[in-house]
Image: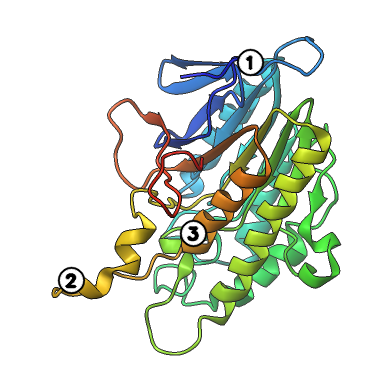
Amino acid sequence: MRNADGIAPRATLRSRVAACALACALSWAPAGDALSASASSQAGGEPYTFAVLSGVIASADDEPRARRLLDAIARDRSVSFIVYEGNLKGPKEACRDQLYEQRNVLFTASRVPLVLLPGQYDWAACGTRDAGAYDPVERLDFLRQNVFTEPASPGANSMPLTRESEVPRFRPYRENVRWVRDATVFIGLNAPGPNNRYLTAGGRNGEFEDRAIANAFWIDHAAEYAKRRKARALVVFLEGDPQFDRYERSERFGWLRFNRPRVRDGFREFKRALVKAAAVFRGSIIVVHPSGEPLANGFRIDRPLRDDKGIWSAI
């Protein structure tokens, strides 16, 4: 389904594949075990592609394969950039400083501009025994200070990035980024699985609450920015699966259920921010994220998010 300009309508793309090339605008076509497509430039120039990766390294044995994958992507000269949607490490690897530094070197060697985003196993799950029982918030701070540092993407060919930390109120949030290619605005968010690290234990979810505010601001800011630029599309990347099928109204009237209530939706603020963004920016909004469940074709393109009235038009 496409609008009059040939741009895909507001949608999400969910993928279980380790690597995929994805169009932000014009054409979508499966290619083997990856999703590949192209996007038209603003002034009718050459189309371009970009690749989306996530969780390609679970152990040291995967490092050579990851290097070969990056080299293979670099050989395709139509690829403008790579987005790595989190998980520099696997769930059973300890969240050690040395490991982060080692993996960061691997990805910064990319010959294609590469945008890194934090994932579940990079910090949110670092409190598990397998990951070394670290403090997840301390590990996130380490990543911010040592990985998400530069105003440009790592790699031999860098790409300018705008970090949310440039906004004084959100100075800690170096990992949230924005960049532009032709008539498309891209943003990356720190929103990991599972459930955006919403903690069900008693006490205040301080880290979650502050980050939810920062993420909502970054989406709002991107929508206004895209509107001012008269962009054709806004693309949002994150590592967590927002589970868009969890419609907000069912949460609101959950008191009617006599069974055990469901866990609070950690992506609720994220979805509300998308609904608000869709009211501000009238171009295409595309959310790209891994799926928490197996998908028949390896990926799915849909329009899953409804607004507060249940209308399938928000994204």
What crowding class fits label 3: few (fewer than 14 Cα within 10 Å), some (14-19), or many (20 or more)?
A: many
Earlier in the chain: of badge 2 and badge 3, it is 3
**Residue that mark 2 sits on:** 257
Vertical placement of 219 versus 130: above or below? above
Visible residue check, residue 176: no
- Please indicate whether residue 244 sits to the left or right of residue 283 in the image: left
* Label number found at residue 5: 1
| Residue at image coords 69%, 69% | 142
Which residue, as the protein is rendered here, is positioned at the far front? 309
SS class, disc 2: loop
In three-dimensional space, the C-alpha distance between marks 2 and 3, rounded to whole angstroms, equals: 31 Å
In three-dimensional space, the C-alpha distance between marks 1 and 3, rounded to whole angstroms, equals: 37 Å
Of circles 2 and 3, which is in front?
2
| Residue at image coords 41%, 51% | 309
In three-dimensional space, the C-alpha distance between marks 1 and 2, rounded to whole angstroms, equals: 45 Å
- Please indicate whether residue 79 sits to the left or right of residue 9 in the image: right
- Please indicate whether residue 230 sits to the left or right of residue 309 in the image: right
